[in-house]
Amino acid sequence: MRKTAVAMIWLLMMLLITLPVCAQVVELPLDLSGGMPYSPEGRLSETSYEDESISVTVEKMRWEETTCYVARIRIAHPSQLRTAPAYAFNRNQTAPIGDIAARVNAVLAINGDYCTYQMKSGSYLLRQGTLYMNDPNPRRDILIIDRNGDFIVEKRAEKETMKKYNPDELANCFNFGPALVVNGEKLSDDYKEDFNYSHDRHRRAAIAQVKKGELEYLCVVTDGSREEKNGGLTIAEFAELLYSLGVETAYNLDGGNTTSMLLCGDKQNAILQGYHRPMSDIIYFASAVLPQE
């Protein structure tokens, strides 16, 4: 009997050793700290990453004779959709996107809305739950991301418009624009006419929520004329692309040479491949899996 008991104890110990340890997914703090370190095992391919808290796949496609990159992201908690400055949101400074993304452990990162320029022209600058500036430019659309991870667009928002929002209920706001898709409807081309370079073909970047109440998002960037003859999209063409992807809300970000998409630090789009243009801020998605000791 004693030998049997010892054997049973030994067997149970071996089972405990070999059983997989369940990963713990945590809520990330709403501040300028980064996400949890992403796992090398989560890098399934050059264009995909997955762990217990996030999945990302990047697809390459053609639209209007232009190469586009569509990242599809699912997260477990709204806090995993984040933004980060080059150094601080109240400083007029820039840094390479790769350096910013590495500092905050970004799984997927894209360029933001050039927040230091928006501060000069007027903006409702709220990042990671902190309101830095309350002076909206009435000629621009504001993308609001609340603490549930839902997208709200205020078209041509003024200071009075933003009074209905409690900053304590918001996570991030962006001021570049224009909005491309709102409540599942593509905005008319004439609405976008007075936004800068709307009729010219340029490299573009956008972020979108597939459906309100669900933590599923798209990030889309395009290549452009430096890489491809007649490459780049007008704002109207870009809006049509986002609409075709079936999103509920889509918003245009800074573009041109700033346009960048990184997966685990590796640049996905071909624009100036290997070169990370300095920028003031990024939008990124992070892992929320607590590292195992």
Image: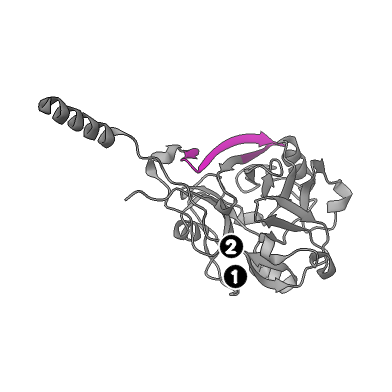
Q: The disc labelled 2 sits on which kind of residue? A: Asp
Q: Residue 108 in the image: state x and y as whole percent.
A: 53, 48
Query: Is label 1 in contact with label 2 (beta carbons under 8 Å)?
Result: yes
How was this image coloured? Answer: one colour
Quadrant in the picture for residue 142: bottom right
Q: For residue 89, which numbered disc appears in the image?
A: 1
Residue highlighted by disc 2: 281
Residue density around tag 2, few if under 14, some if 14–19, many if 20 or more, within 10 Å: many
Which of the two residues, 170 or 124, is positioned nearer the viewer here?
Answer: 170
Q: Quadrant of residue 70?
A: top right
Q: Eyeballing the image, is 34 above or below 52?
A: below
The crowding category of the residue bearing disc 1, from other C-alpha atoms within 10 Å (few below 14, some 14 to 19, many at least 20), is: many
Residue 170 position, x and y percent, is 68, 60
263 left or right of 168? left
Q: Earlier in the sequence, mark 1 or mark 2?
A: 1
Q: Magenta region: which residues?
A: 48-69
